[in-house]
Image (cartoon, rainbow, N blue to C red):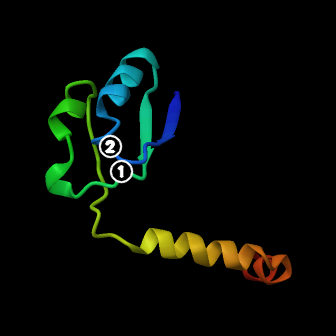
Amino acid sequence: MKIATWNVNSVNARLPTMLEVFKAVPADVWCLQELKCIDEKFPREDIEALCNSLYKIPKTIEKFAESAEEFRKKSANPPELKKRIA
């Protein structure tokens, strides 16, 4: 299985390039980040035309960025992190 990730930085601005890359790169799963697009403006039909299924996490979920920031802060203090994992 081939998994590809891409920090798109605006799905609508990069759509033509994305579609070409999807055709050229044989990945089984694409993980796209930084879509910068509300759900109503997401180009679902264009992307679904090139894939078997599509799952998009709604933009309303904001906890992922907070979780990543919290993890970064805790990672800066390895003894605390090791204590929590053990």
Looking at the rendered structure, the kind of residue marked 1 is Leu
The residue carrying mark 1 is: 35
Residue at 51% x, 34% y: name it: 4
- Residue at image coords 78%, 75%: 76
Q: Residues within 10 Å of mark 1 (few under 14, many from 20)?
A: some
Side of 56 where 84 appears, left or right: right
Residue 14 spot, x, y in % from top left: 35, 36
Q: Residues within 10 Å of mark 2 (few under 14, many from 20)?
A: many
Specify the quadrant that holds the C terminus.
Answer: bottom right
| Mark 2 → mark 1, Cα distance in angstroms | 5 Å
* Closest to the observer, 49 or 19: 19
SS category of the residue bearing label 1: loop
| x 29%, y 47%: residue | 55
Q: Residue at x 69, y 78 (%)?
A: 73
Q: Residue 56, which numbered label?
A: none
**Residue wearing tag 2:** 11
Q: Left of 41 or right of it: where is 63?
A: right
Marks 2 and 1, the one that precedes in the sequence: 2
**Secondary-structure class at tag 2:** loop
Vertical position of residue 16 compared to residue 13: above or below: above
Q: Is residue 82 above or below residue 21?
A: below
Give the quarter of the image for residue 38. Answer: bottom left
- Percent across and percent down for residue 66 are 50, 76
Q: Residue furthest front?
A: 13
Quadrant in which residue 16 is drawn: top left
**Quarter where residue 23 is shown:** top left
Q: Nearer the viewer, residue 27 or 46?
A: 46
Q: Is residue 17 left or right of residue 43?
A: right
